[in-house]
Image (spheres, helix red, strand yellow):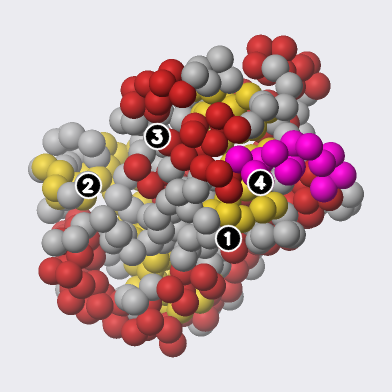
């Protein structure tokens, strides 16, 4: 993309003018997290059609200006962190001085909301509402008036599933502004894997493989999956790191399943894809609606895996519906997890049918190209400026 030139709020790009959009997140990769990964993928693609910048918190007191995937990223100094929110006063002047067309906030991020309100910015506001503030029992109620003030000023609110829109008490007051745009991934990054890489995983960990991916934190519910393994004849691969690693490993030892529950830690992308393709089943055992979507489900579905997930009041069962692309069980229920895993392990025809449907649903509903196209259409609605996306690469015919 050639260097754009700003003229009267729009950006000249060759012979056409495109909107200028400022995305505001909490952090940005290499800091890992679902919202951070989504923000990077979205902005890298939007950059092909728009002028896009990102401001986020840095993880220390320093300021960093860099360009990643063609996107200028401004990491602002963090004074301190409270309730998982980095305090970044530098966001206020950045927002106040922005002379583009759209500020796009990614929530939950109380500091970004307060910075937006304090900045006096009066241009168009778009919000992606990834999740409610679930665990902050005291901060949540105190912050709500500010959150509602920002949402009232928004031109549009993106929610990632119809389920979350219907179950959020916050969004209930702003439904007229809400648009459902599910998260998307690069399907082609997950749909194929070299056979030798698959064979290597199976040689190392055995057959009848179950895979689960995510940070080892409270809302992921991994302890219930470890308990379920006492009733499953198979081998579990848990990919991810986090503060609960020690307690989960101790639980596996206590239950006598250490030889069949393997903690792989942080893996590179190639190893992750190999794990998906070597496995028979993917499990997302999350227990509370802090798990708003479960993007790892989409990765596994793109690899052709049936999913066992939980019936949360969030986007989790929307991504993989019960009986269509997998099986859905009550949260925090090891017996039900075990029963569904065993059903899929022991029924290759059902497993293949659900896995093929999962691959098709991932392609049709959760591709990066689809998400970007829907986002550009929303921006067009907000600004009145048509910004066609670059042609998406052709995908292989559905199997």
Report which residue position mark 4 lands on: 340
Residue 349 falls within the magenta-colored stretch: yes
The disc label shown at residue 84, or none: 2
* Mark 3 or mark 4: whose residue is earlier in sequence: 3
Q: CA distance from mark 1 to mark 2?
A: 27 Å
Disc number for residue 133: none
Sequence-first tag of 3 and 2: 2
Circle 1: is it few (<14), some (14-19), or many (20+) Cα within 10 Å?
many
At a point 39% along the width and 34% down the height, the residue shown is 216
Does residue 110 appear to the left or right of 314 in the view shown? left
User: Quick one: label 4 or label 2, which is nearer the N terminus?
Assistant: 2
Q: Name the element at disc 1.
A: helix
Q: Position of residue 347 (x, y in %)?
A: 82, 41
Q: Is residue 16 visible?
A: no
**Does the CB distance between marks 3 and 2 fall below 8 Å?**
no
How far apart in space, not on screen, are marks 3 and 4 (Cα)? 22 Å
Which of labels 1 and 2 is toward the front?
A: 1
Q: Which residue is mark 1?
A: 317
């Amino acid at each position: 993309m050639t260097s754009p030139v700003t003229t009267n709020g729009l950006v000249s790009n060759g012979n056409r003018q495109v909107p200028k959009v400022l995305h505001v997140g909490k952090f940005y990769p290499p800091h890992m997290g679902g919202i951070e990964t989504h923000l990077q993928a979205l902005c890298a693609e939007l950059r092909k059609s728009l002028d896009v910048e990102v401001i986020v918190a840095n993880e220390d007191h320093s300021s960093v200006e860099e360009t990643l995937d063609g996107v200028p990223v401004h990491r602002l100094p963090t004074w301190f962190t409270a309730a998982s929110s980095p305090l970044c006063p530098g966001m206020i002047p950045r927002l106040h001085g922005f002379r583009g067309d759209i500020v796009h906030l990614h929530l939950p991020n109380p500091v970004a909301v307060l910075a937006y309100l304090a900045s006096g910015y009066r241009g168009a506001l778009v919000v992606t509402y990834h999740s409610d503030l679930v665990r902050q029992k005291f901060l949540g109620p105190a912050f709500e008036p500010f959150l509602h003030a920002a949402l009232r000023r928004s031109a549009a609110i993106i929610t990632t599933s119809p389920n979350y829109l219907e179950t959020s008490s916050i969004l209930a007051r702003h439904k007229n502004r809400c648009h459902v745009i599910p998260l998307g991934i690069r399907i082609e990054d997950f749909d194929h894997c070299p056979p030798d890489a698959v064979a290597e995983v199976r040689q190392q960990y055995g057959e009848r493989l179950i895979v689960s991916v995510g940070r080892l934190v409270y809302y992921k519910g991994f302890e219930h999956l470890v308990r379920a393994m006492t009733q499953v004849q198979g081998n579990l691969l848990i990919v991810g790191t986090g503060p609960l690693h020690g307690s989960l490993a101790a639980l596996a030892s206590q239950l006598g399943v250490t030889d069949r529950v393997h903690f792989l830690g942080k893996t590179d992308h190639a190893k992750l894809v190999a794990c998906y393709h070597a496995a028979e089943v993917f499990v997302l055992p999350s227990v509370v609606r802090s798990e708003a979507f479960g993007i790892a489900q989409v990765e596994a579905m793109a690899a052709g895996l049936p999913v066992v997930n939980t019936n949360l009041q969030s986007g989790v069962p929307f991504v993989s519906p019960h009986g269509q692309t997998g099986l859905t069980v009550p949260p925090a229920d090891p017996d039900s997890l075990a029963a569904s895993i065993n059903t899929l392990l022991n029924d290759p025809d059902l497993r293949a049918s659900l896995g093929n449907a999962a691959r098709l649903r991932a392609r049709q509903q959760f591709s990066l190209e689809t998400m970007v196209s829907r986002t550009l259409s929303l921006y067009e609605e907000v600004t009145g400026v048509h910004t066609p996306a670059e042609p998406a690469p052709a995908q292989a015919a559905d199997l």
